[in-house]
Image (tube, rainbow, N blue to C red):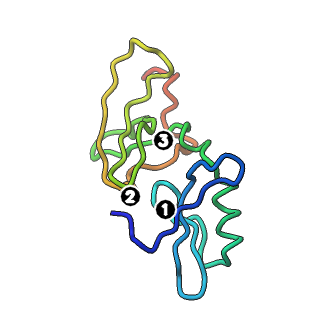
Amino acid sequence: MLPAEWIPHRRPDDREHVGWIRPDGDAWVAVSLLGRELTGPVDWLEAEEALDALSLAWLADVWMLERDGAPPLRVRLVEVTPDGVVVQTDDFGAIDVPVERYDLPWPPPPTLRPRRPGDPDGRVLSH
């Protein structure tokens, strides 16, 4: 559930919602659409700048979903709202590839993470 004191932040050029700014004593903290802190306590303008710099491009990135006893799974973000996060297995842009969807809470657990070097890239078959 989204805390009532979080203030939505929209990009100035197109008014697209890119995150929230939450109070932290006399300072402010920038929070991404995934509910993850982007800054520590900073002034209001720094929080705005952090959110504007992050923008929304990261939503299209490949993410990894860690699983117990299995290698990380390549996923794409399908829906991100304070009601929950939906990811699906990466279809590599093909329309005829079956995908699996996973419903995660918001904010998502740390098992949903950005892709790192060494993670499966989806282009190399197992040996």
Which is nearer the N-term, disc 1 or disc 2?
A: 1
Which is nearer the N-term, disc 1 or disc 3?
A: 1
- Left or right for 21, reference 48: left
Please state the horizontal and vertical placement of residue 79, each as a whole percent of the image.
41, 41
Please state the horizontal and vertical placement of residue 9, each as a whole percent of the image.
58, 60
Labelled pair 3, 2 in contact (Cβ < 8 Å): no
Q: Nearer the viewer, residue 61 or 127?
A: 61
Callout 2: helix, strand or loop? loop
Q: Nearer the viewer, residue 23 or 109?
A: 23
- Left or right for 8, reference 50: left
Residue placed at 60% from the left, 45% from the top?
56
Q: Nearer the viewer, mark 1 or mark 3?
A: 1
Label 1 – label 3 distance at C-alpha: 15 Å
Q: Amino acid at mark 3?
A: Trp
Label 3 – label 2 distance at C-alpha: 15 Å
Which is nearer the N-term, disc 3 or disc 2?
A: 3
Residue 62 vertical placement versus 125 (above, below): below
Q: Nearer the viewer, mark 3 or mark 2?
A: 2
Label 1 – label 2 distance at C-alpha: 7 Å
Q: Which residue is mark 3?
A: 63
Q: Which residue is mark 2?
A: 107
Callout 1: helix, strand or loop? loop
Residue 36's disc number: 1
